Image (cartoon, helix red, strand yellow):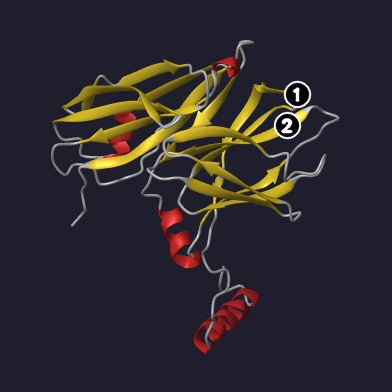
Amino acid sequence: MTTTFHYIAPHLFPIFPEEMGETIVGADFETVLMQAATEMMDIDLTLKIETFMDGNVMSSETEILKVRDKKVSPRFIRRTYTMPRCGYVVLSLTAPEPYFHRLKPEFGYAILRRPDGGFTTIIAQAKYAVHLIIDAIRETGTFCLVHPSHYMDRARNTGNSAFLVNPYEGQIVARIAAANGRVFKHRLNSNSAELVSLEPVLEDGVPNCVMYTGNNRLIGWDVRHKLDESGSVYNVDHLEYYRAYPTMENVGVRRRAEKAVRRALRRMELWF
């Protein structure tokens, strides 16, 4: 029997400071429900949209999504946000009865529209219910994000920062460590977001793998910008979830024998 839920995991988008541009958030809820509730039975769903900055709720609105004959009305939502400092927006979708069979559907992208008219896309991040994170913490006991190639280059005016969000109650102390051995810590207050420069751990002109650990889960994006003008953002990408799955497998005598037989059959062109 398929397990169903009253909700799907809330999804977050970062809201950049207004000097960096407008953050435009959109979602196609018919597509979301095709992933999260494939039968799409008739129901009224509640969409809650909240924005946060500096630990405070800046705005909150609720909209009813009506599902009728596998169609959703309204199907699309679009909101444009500007804030004086870093913030974030949370989209939560709930049902009056168990309805969703998938907690983490794809929510699509937002857009950061820069003052010069250019733009970059931003992918949503789930607030919880990410199996990779659950498995990694179970295996290692520590929350961890990673990026394989953060980069700063003074000669090319290339800078790199991380947009970090703490959407939970309670303070998070993030430990940011690069493969070159450089480390620093950064404190994130409850329900807050910050754009954190990675200059303390990066070497000029040298790509570096950076790991983010903390006393609780945090949500982050990799932000590329001009070094002398952090407001000139030209790329936003998500930070990767650290995979903690075992990389070695204990192969017994039976498995070795099976592989030997397959190799022999391939040599005789009897196995492909």
User: Where is 30 relative to 3, above or below?
Assistant: above
Relative to 79, 245 lies left or right: right
Q: Residue at x 37, y 43 (%)?
A: 169
Bin the neighbour count of mark 1 within 10 Å (Cα to Cα): few under 14, some 14-19, many 20 and up.
few
Using the image, tell me which numbered label, if any, was put on residue 228: 1
Using the image, tell me which numbered label, if any, was put on residue 244: none
Q: Earlier in the sequence, mark 2 or mark 1?
A: 2
Q: Quadrant of the N terminus?
A: bottom left
Residue 211 placed where, x, y %?
Answer: 62, 52
Q: Are marks 2 and 1 in contact (CB under 8 Å)?
A: yes
Q: Residue at x 76, y 45 (%)?
A: 207
Q: Residue at x 59, y 78 (%)?
A: 265
In the rendered image, which residue does mark 2 sit on? 159
Query: Residue 69's image quarter?
Result: top left
Query: Residue 272's image quarter?
Result: bottom right
Q: Nearer the viewer, mark 2 or mark 1?
A: 1
Q: Residue furthest bottom?
A: 253
Relative to 66, 149 lies left or right: right
Q: How many marks?
A: 2
